[in-house]
Image: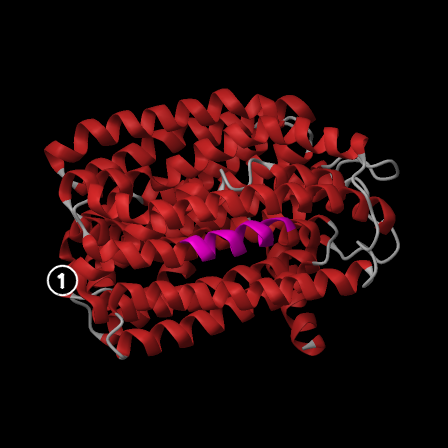
Amino acid sequence: MIAGEHSIRRNTALAFAVNMTAAAFTAALTLFLVRALGPHDYGVYALALSIAALLTLPSDLGISSAAARFVAERRGDRAGVTEILVDALKLKLLIASAVALGLFAAAGAVAAAYDEPGLLWPLRAMAAVLFSQSILQLVGGTFTAQGRIVANLWIALSASTVELLTAVSLVLLGGGAAGAAFGRTAGWAVALVVGLTLLGRFLGRSAFAGRRTTPNALRRIAAYASGLALVEVSFALFDQVGAVLIGAFLGSAAVGMFQAPMRLLAFLHLPGLAVANAVAPRLARHARVAPNIGALLSALRWVILLQTLFAAPLLVWSEPVVGLLLGAEYDDSIGLLRILTPYMFLSGLAPLLSLTVNYLGRARRRIPIAVGALAINVTLAAILIPTIGVEGAALGSVAGFLLYVPGHFWLCRQALGFPVLPLAKTLVRALLAGAAAAGVLWAFGTEELALREWLGGAVLAPAAFVAVLLATRELTAADLKQLAARVRARRRRG
C-alpha cells in the first residue's frame, strides 16, 4: 500500500459522511420548500434545477471524470497530479464559463417557451450554480481519486449550510422560487472558494504558478474525456428528462409532484455512492498496486443487501411516508414511490459499476449502454406522460435503468473476470429477506400510522430482514460480531 493512503473502509465512511451531509441538508430544505412554496412555485424551482442539471455535464464534457482516472493512476505523485490538473482546469474554465453564460442569456427564451415568467430569475441564478458545480466536479474528483475524501466533506458542509440558511431566509422574506434558487447560488459560491483553498493546500500554494499546458497530458485528458462526454451527457439527460417532459406536457405543478419524491429518494442511494467513491479508484491501473477486485465484490454484496432493505418501506408504506414528509398536497406522489422502487434499488449499484468502468479506462464501452438507456427512457416518457401522467416518467426511468445497470455490470465482469454466481445468490437471499421485512411492515398497516406502529415497523422489519439473511447463511454470526466490533472501535476513536 502506498504511504499515506487512506483505507477503503475509512474512505467509505468519509464518502458516506459527505453524501449524508449534502442529502440531510437537501432533505431539510426540500421539506421546507415543498410546504412553503406549494406545488406550483416548488415546481418552478424544480424545473429550473432540472434544466440546469441537464447542462451540468455538457459544461464538463467528461473532463472531470477523465482527470480523476489519471489522477488515481498517480496516487502519491503530487507533481503528476498537478500536471493533470493544470490542463484539466484550463479546459474546465473555458467550457463552464461558456455554458453558464449561455444559460443566463437564454433564460428569458426558456421561460417563454414554458409559458412560465417566474422561471426567468431561478434560471439565471442556476447559471451561477452551474459554473461553481462544474469547477467543483474537478476539485472533488481529484480529492476522491487521491483518497482525500475528508476535503469533500468540508466542501459539502459549506455548500449545504450556506444554501439552507440563505434559501430559507429569502423564501420567508417573500423571494419565492427565485429566492430558493439564489440561496443555492450562495451555497455553491462559498463551496467553490473552500474547494479551491483546500486544493491549494493539498498541492502547495505555488503548485499552479508558472506551469504551462503539457501537450501530452492535454491529449490524454481530451481523448478519454471525449468518450466520457457522450456517456455523461446521456446520463444527465436520462436523470432529468422526466421532469423536463412533465413540465412541457403537464405544467410546473406536475413537475413538483414528480421531483419531490425523487429528491427524497436520493437518500437511499447514498451507501452505494459512498462505497463507489471509496472503492472505484482502487480499480485504476496503477504501476505498483493491482486492481482490488475483492473490494469491488464485497461492495456489490453489501449494496445489494442495503438497497433491498430500503425497498420494503417504499412498497408498503409509501402512503404514510408521503403524508408524513410531503403533506396532503402531494398525494399524487404516493403511487410514484411504489413505481420507483426498482429505480431506487438499481440507483445504489449504478455509481459503483459506472465509476469502476471509468477508472478501468473503458469509458467508451459505456456509450451504447448509456445511449440505449436514454432512448428507452425518452421514448416511454414521451408516450406515457400525455396518457397516464407523471407515472409515465417514472416507468421510463425504471425501464432505462434495467438496461443501464446490468450493462455496466457486464462491462465490469468482462474487464475483471470475477465470478457471478455468489452475487446471484446474494440477490436471491436479499429478495427473500426483503419480502419478510415487507410482510412485517404490512402487518402494522399501510395508511395512517400511529407512533407505536412507526416504531414497531422500524425495529421489527430490519430484524426480520437480518433473521432471513442469517437463516439462508448470507450473513453469519461472525459477520455480525465483526460489524459490531467495527462500530465499537469507531465510537472509541470518535
Residue in front for this viewpoint, 225 or 279: 225
Magenta stretch prevailing secondary structure: helix
Q: Is residue 263 above or below residue 298?
A: below
Residue in front for this viewpoint, 153 or 78: 78
| Residue 303 shown left or right of residue 403 in the figure | right
> Residue 50: horizontal and vertical position, in percent?
34, 47
Q: Residue furthest left?
A: 387
> Residue 441: horizontal and vertical position, in percent?
27, 58
Q: Residue at x 13, y 64 (%)?
A: 328
Q: Residue at x 19, y 27 (%)?
A: 383
Q: Which stretch is magenta?
A: 127-138
Q: Is residue 481 visible?
A: no
Residue type, label 1: Glu
Q: Residue at x 22, y 71 (%)?
A: 36
- Quarter-of-image position of residue 7: bottom right
Please give the count of numbered marks on the rendered protein.
1
- Residue highlighted by disc 1: 329
> Residue 452: horizontal and vertical position, in percent?
26, 75
User: SS of the residue at dot 1?
Assistant: helix
- Quarter-of-image position of residue 381: top left
Q: Is residue 148 visible?
A: yes
Q: Is residue 220 above or below residue 282?
A: above
Q: Is residue 133 on the magenta stretch?
A: yes
Q: Residues within 10 Å of mark 1 (few under 14, many from 20)?
A: some
